[in-house]
Amino acid sequence: MSAIPAELRFAESHEWAKQEGDLIVVGISNHAQEALGDVVFVELPEIGKVFAAGDAAGVVESVKAASDIYSPVSGEVVEVNEALSGEPEALNNAPYSAWIFKIKASNAEGDLAKLLDAAGYKAAIGE
């Protein structure tokens, strides 16, 4: 089990968010990748697409299930991790460094404040 990085914020739907300047980097938690099993495909959101916090933004498919990825913040997708197209298992191998997309948040402070901190997320998943 990998430690939950203290600098990340978490959605209850198991996405993590990390602020980098005016961008929010989004990925899935270790708990999520363990529940999914071996990830075999990632459907990335379109660059330029605008999401509200909580909107389905993509899909992660594993050998067991397909699961929506929800945007933890509102804003516009400005970059996607194309490397996941050829190496989706990066989400299993390094869930906290294998990001899925970056979003230019329209209300970063407000949206991030609604997410769980590492301790809150740990409690939410019963660790």
Image (cartoon, helix red, strand yellow):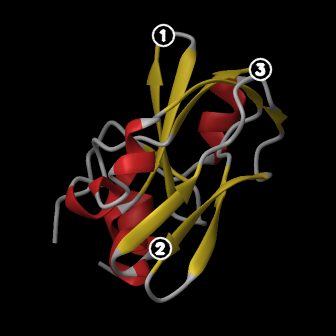
- Residue type indicated by callout 1: Gly
Residue 21's disc number = 1
Amino acid type at image mark 3 = Ser
For label 3, the residue is 106
Q: Secondary structure at mark 1?
A: loop
Specify few, some or many for label 3: CA neighbours under 10 Å numbering under 14, 14-19, or 20 or more: some
**Residue highlighted by disc 2:** 124
Closer to the camera in the image, 93 or 7: 93
| N-terminal-most mark, 2 or 3 | 3
User: Which amino acid, by three-letter code, is at mark 2?
Assistant: Ala
Side (left or right) of 74 relative to 97: right
Relative to the observer, which residue lies in front, 86 or 109? 86
Rendered residue at 60%/77% (across/down): 66
> Who's the residue at 36% across and 53% down the image?
118
Chain-order first, disc 2 or disc 1: 1
Q: Quadrant of the C terminus?
A: bottom left
Residue 93 location (% of width, % of height): 20, 59
Quadrant that contains the N terminus: bottom left
Q: Residue at x 77, y 44 (%)?
A: 53
Relative horizontal placement of residue 46, taking residue 25 as reference (left or right): right
Q: Is residue 32 above or below residue 9?
A: below
- Crowding near pointer 1: few (<14 within 10 Å), some, many (20+)? few
| Quadrant of the rendered image containing residue 95 | bottom left
Of mark 1 and mark 3, the one earlier in the sequence is 1
Vertical relation: 118 (above or below) 108: below
Question: Which is in the foreground here, disc 2 or disc 1?
Answer: 1
Q: Secondary structure at mark 2?
A: helix
As drawn, the label of residue 123 is none
- Residue appearing at x 77%, y 20% in the figure: 106
Q: Crowding near pointer 2: few (<14 within 10 Å), some, many (20+)?
A: few
Say if 21 sits above or below 120 in the image: above
